[in-house]
Image (spheres, helix red, strand yellow):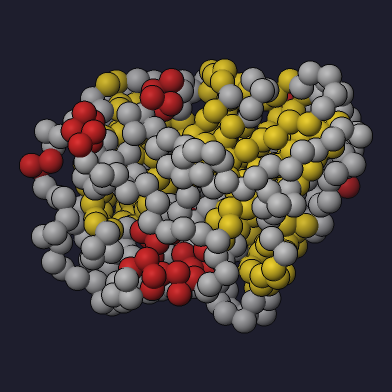
Amino acid sequence: MTYISRRGFLAAGGATLSMAALPRFAFAQSAMSLTAGSRVLDIDGRAATVYGLEGPKGQGLFLNPGERFRVDLTNSLDVPTLIHWHGQVPPNDQDGVPDLPRPVLQPGETRSYNYEPLEGTYWMHAHIPLHEMNLLAAPLIVRSAEDVKADRQEVVMFLHDFSFKAPEEVMQEITGGSGAGHDMNAMGGSSPGASNDHSGMQMGNSSMSMDMSMLDGMTMDLNDYDWDAYLTNDRTLSDPDVVRVEKGGRIKLRVINGAAATVFWIDTGKVSARLVAVDGHAIQPLEGNRFGVAMGQRLDLELDLSGEGAWPMLALREGAKERTGLILATAGAAVDKIAALADENSPAFDRDMAQELKLRGLESLPARPAQSSPMVMLGGSMQPYVWTIDGKVWGEHTPIVARTGERVEIMFHNTSMMGHPMHLHGHVFQVVDINGRRIEGARRDTVYVPPMGMVTVALDAGEAARWMLHCHHMPHLQTGMMTEFAVSA
């Protein structure tokens, strides 16, 4: 990962890309190279071959204020793939969904991208679930003028979950070998093998009266797979990333949950943090030392370190003992070993939406009445392992429709016992209602909808195109939990 010091230089522990220290003219708006390829990681002393996204000097891309996203993406893998710029709002033909509208990138092929990026903490990943599960993902950081002026060090905390087994084997275990997975390599087509029988799922209006108190006597499915390792910047706590910081330093910690299927709590320990942005968009600062982050979401945390020492920044797997993280440490400070297992399970994440209810965006959508208010029903079950939107898997779906410029309020109603981080392509939305409580919440691109919960987001429909709307739990996406937001002119 990249660590940009308070004066714009690489910190001693930094090992990769630092474009931010260069003047803008040094770029001359020439295209950056980005390569989807294979790499080898050391996971607890065992070699693992995974995918990755290699920029000019390491995994990921960092852009300066005002710099366009000009990237030449080359596929050096031996399989076709395609990369989505998560949370960014490029023209639809650059969004990175296979066959919607452009085809996958063949081995050896290069494709160029050029658009004006949104500033903030973003990331990029394959929009083929099995590839993302194999770590074809990396940070995409677009720095603001405020970032450049600020007297603080920037640290990226990129989280993932990992299995030594191939993603296809992982899916076989998760689905019980039922063959329930769909071909998400051809997202524009049908979903072979999808069942039309959803009678075993908790669907329909009968569940509308269920409130969160009823969950107390029911079993939530927090995690549906035990991964072999949980990674921060490609490393586990057996050999963590140690970031050298200045005495009394000020830190901006950019947290990205790139995991396939794991929600994390970010625990800053003895250091009080200020949550200042979610999904790249500023919020009214929220103080604390533990914040939850679902798959696809990002957190920007500001930290003020006191004196000299070492400060673990941990990511705790929800509902379990596993954890990962990195260490902030001043020069010469002793760094104690941290076990990969905590003494007790961490709690479930935001089942009552307590965290989301506290978030307030610094900028709200202009007030105007909604012209359409579609309800999106999220359903599914562990047996059979199939996950749906409005009772349908991808390929059998009915699009959500809107016209460019219309104010749309989408209400997500989760009728299942698993949480779903719902991600909409090509748009930034605002959370405006949680379980019937109206708020002026955070602006986001990915919102977590807890079991039996209801969340409404508002947006103004953008470019006339087919935009994907899906769960960012990769096994759920692989088994069909995707629809489209179809915008017409």
The residue located at (77%, 35%) in the rendering is 328
In the depicted view, which residue is nearer to us: 181 or 145?
Answer: 181
| Vertical arrangement, residue 157 with respect to residue 333, above or below | below
Residue 275 visible in the picture: yes
The residue located at (68%, 76%) in the rendering is 76
* Horizontal relation, residue 96 to residue 468: left or right: right
Question: Which quadrant holds residue 446?
Answer: top left
Q: Position of residue 25 (x, y in %)?
A: 87, 44
The residue located at (66%, 70%) in the rendering is 48
* Horizontal relation, residue 245 to residue 146: left or right: right
The residue located at (32%, 23%) in the rendering is 368
| Vertical arrangement, residue 456 with respect to residue 10, above or below | above
* Horizontal relation, residue 346 to residue 150: left or right: left
| Vertical arrangement, residue 432 with respect to residue 342, above or below | above
In the depicted view, which residue is nearer to us: 149 or 29?
Answer: 149
Q: Position of residue 167 (x, y in %)?
A: 49, 70
Q: Count the marks: how many? A: 0
Q: Residue furthest front?
A: 343
In the depicted view, which residue is nearer to us: 103 or 424?
Answer: 424
In the depicted view, which residue is nearer to us: 57 or 165?
Answer: 165
* Horizontal relation, residue 159 to residue 12: left or right: left
Residue 123 visible in the picture: no
Q: Position of residue 234 (x, y in %)?
A: 68, 55
Q: Position of residue 202 (x, y in %)?
A: 16, 50
